[in-house]
Image: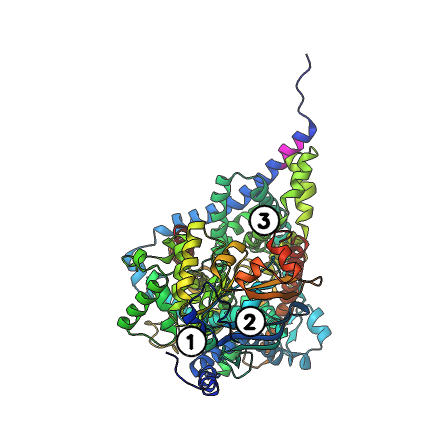
Amino acid sequence: MLEQLSPATTAREIKKNLRRRWRFGEKFIEGWIFLAGILTIVILLGIIALLLKEGLPIFLDTPPWEFFFGTKWYPVSDPPTFGIMPFFVATIWVTLVATAISVPVGVACAAYLSEVAPAKVRETVKPVIEILAGIPSVVMGFIGLMLLSPLVQSAFNLNTGLSGLTAGIMLSLMSLPIIISVSEDALRAVPSDFRQAAYALGATRWETIWHVSIPGALSGITAAVMLGVGRAIGETMTVLMVAGGALAVPVSPTEPMMPMTAAIASGIGNAVRGGLQYQALFAIGLVLFVITLAVNLVADRVLERQKRKFAR
Amino acid sequence: MKMNSVLSNIDKDKAVDRNEVKLRTDTVSLYYGSFQALRNISLEISERTITAIIGPSGCGKSSFIRLFNRMNDLITGARVEGIVELDDIPIYDRTIDVVELRKRVGMVFQKPNPFPMSIFENVAFGPRRHGRYNLGELEDIVEKSLNQAALWDEVKDKLGQSALSLSGGQQQRLCIARVLAVEPEVILMDEPCSALDPVATLKIEDLMRSLAENYTIVIVTHNMQQAARASDMSAFFMMEEDRAGVLVEYGLTSELFTNPKDKRTEDYITGRFG
Amino acid sequence: MKARAIPTRQLSQRAAFSLIIVATIIVVIPVLVIVLQIILNGASAISWDFLTQAPSQAGKAGGILPAIVGTFYLMLGTIVFALPLGVMAGIYLTEYARDNWLTRLINLAILNLAGVPSIVYGLFGLGIFVLLFHFGMSLLSASLTLACQALAMTVTTSREAILAVPREYKEGSLAIGATRWQTIRHLVLPQALPGIITGAVLAMSRAAGETAPILVVGAAFLIPGLPQSPFDQFMALPYHLYTVAAHVPGMPKSTVWGVALVLLVVVLSFNILATIIRLRTRQRRLNA
């Protein structure tokens, strides 16, 4: 039994129900979600703004040339001088040592785990690497202090085992997990067709790895290396505890030295808020920020390119 | 649009009810970015009929039915030209609440997609979102919907079990019950049986018959035999050279399959391509 | 009779394989040495008193309870800020963000934040929370600083967890007239929860081990009593380890190793917890 409603009335009724609702609860929550979404940008901009605000003024006192290339960091002398070469060179030394160790070892280990190792071995080694990745940097610094530095001291006949070399070795341990993990992913991303083709031509497994897998994964491995380098540059506690803390520009890795991160960490406690040393430390922070930013950005670009290379 | 004269195997009494047009498209074209998926589709679907959308794969059948519940909106770059109406109301108007629209126009998908919850929770999900929280009320709704979906007897003792423990055919009927629970007016079905075995398929076709007494059903199907035996009206779509889908022929199923007016329809039905 | 010569290609393969195995051993051995040394040298210092008493004699005797408590407060404080914001940002990126410049900028920001050195986070916390907001050297400042550092991780893990929820569920929900937020709240988030929690636990573990930021922002070496409010100063395990290892002469060796052991146990147990959650959800999903 159909009701005798005129089509117009029915349509109006239905349209009223279909009309757009203002769902206030929904809008409220979605507003907060949006704010949370842009929070990361806000924080990043905040970091940049703060570093600039607190760090740039140092260049009013110390001209950039003197700041970046000066070799004397005497914040308490009269007048104080702020040259960061000792820190910059120290960072380079420890990073070099760390990279020289962690890259060959890490890539080789990644090659073993992804191409050669039987599953059982992989399943045992991967958790060990994850444990390594989880060890806090202060613990690494502590181990370097207690176990490694006496060894280095006696091996090289030094006055103190606290040196760039010691720090570099500990840093290499800390860079290994990321280098191994990213390299492994890169190697695994090389399509198996390439390897099959090589085997079909009579290549041995190693020849395939060396001539096919590794070249195919090269951009990923490069990215891994860069991420490892970025990690080494930015690490603080390990170098603070183990690199020695000397203020002279180091000419050899066996000297005690103070990389940029350690310089900030050890100086910031004493610096008068807003004073020259404070500004200088923030300026070093700015330099650090820019360097690690650049390294990580390039690494990410390289990784994107590798992903696209093999996208099917 | 009076059709009572030609509905031979359908109850003549019901013919009067079927005069109202439920869904209408008027020269509708659908674009995904710069790609045209549908071109100038015009047809009218009467209420409480079963309309089958048939045609070769890729010709836009799924995109077409998604016009009616605006699921194409979820795809970035999707754009609709022309008019799509539900009960004479243009649904692509900016004043329309899409959420309310989807309550009235429900959808069952090709691969059964029950939520990872209990059977009860699956069916109660819709009503709960629309404001029904009273447990007694929900229990009634769940029982009624599962009955309508011909699933109640099979699951009434295990409503608390995970929906994923059901067979494929049961899962699909559960998805139908889930749609029924929000009391829609139209049920869109996108190849609902293609992932099911023949026995389950027949059960669903029977189910469609009983549902058509109260709901308007539009079903996309690859299976011509299914279209021929289960639908009242059929719409044959095809893809033109630029890959845009067009409506070739639309009419009574009995006529379209025995006496197609367009040669392309005839070729498809006789299997010369597809 | 011709002697069986091993072809050079096989020889070089064997040599190469030995080298990469050696490399793997070089990776594994130090980890074992470190963990074993800490356990062996530190175990003797561990006692009920050590874990439940406050330090005495300027830290040379007594226990490290305040440091343990401080660390737990820090972990809690970090996650209280970083988790909700991280989840919401993850929801934004997966459900609401369109493919435009803003989204690309957000992703870029996340990447950059993940690579900022921890000492720079310390400077940020100092300038903003300690000084600008006037929270002072306190638990609150330190928690907020560590939360900023953890945010990149919580956003990333939340986003991945939400993306892992099959699209069919979302489609099914929207198709019966649920709103976007309803779909997220009642369907997507519950499904993504294990992944989100795993990320949260990992972030907490990381916060427990961070020293450089709290060194700049509020950790102290010896504080009488436990922090009573978020504005109090606090002790923390990593900072305690740093100080007694490098700056307190006459410290009994075993005590220092003991502190390292406690810190290691805290950090690693949270890592193991995260792994357990991850494996158990995978198992449950396979069984469903």
For this view, does B128 lie left or right of residue A308? left
Is the Cβ of the residue at disc 2 closer than 8 Å to that at disc 1? no
Cα distance between the residues tagged 3 and 1: 40 Å
Q: Name the residue type under label 1.
A: Leu
For this view, does B143 lie left or right of residue A169? left
Q: Name the residue type under label 2.
A: Leu
Position of B146 relative to A116 (above/below):
below
- Which chain does the residue under circle 2 lie in? B
Residue found at the far right of this picture: A65
Crowding around mark 1 (Cα neighbors within 10 Å: few <14, some 14 to 19, many 20+) is many
Q: Position of residue C278 (x, y in %)?
A: 43, 55
Cα distance between the residues tagged 2 and 1: 53 Å
- The residue drawn where x is 38% and y is 60% is B174
Q: Nearer the viewer, residue C187 or A224?
A: C187
What element does badge 1 sit on?
helix
Q: Nearer the viewer, residue A265 or A56?
A: A56
The residue to which callout 1 is attached is C140
- Dominant SS of magenta comes to helix
Q: Position of residue A253 (x, y in %)?
A: 64, 54
- Which chain does the residue under circle 3 lie in? A
Q: Name the residue type under label 3.
A: Glu
Cα distance between the residues tagged 2 and 3: 46 Å
Crowding around mark 2 (Cα neighbors within 10 Å: few <14, some 14 to 19, many 20+) is some
For this view, does A49 lie left or right of residue C275? right
Range shown magenta: C11-16
Position of B102 relative to A311 (above/below):
below
Q: Is residue C65 visible?
A: yes
Quadrant of the rendered image containing residue C182:
bottom left
Q: Position of residue B20 (x, y in %)?
A: 48, 77
The residue to which callout 3 is attached is A184
The residue to which callout 2 is attached is B67
Q: Position of residue C231 (x, y in %)?
A: 39, 78
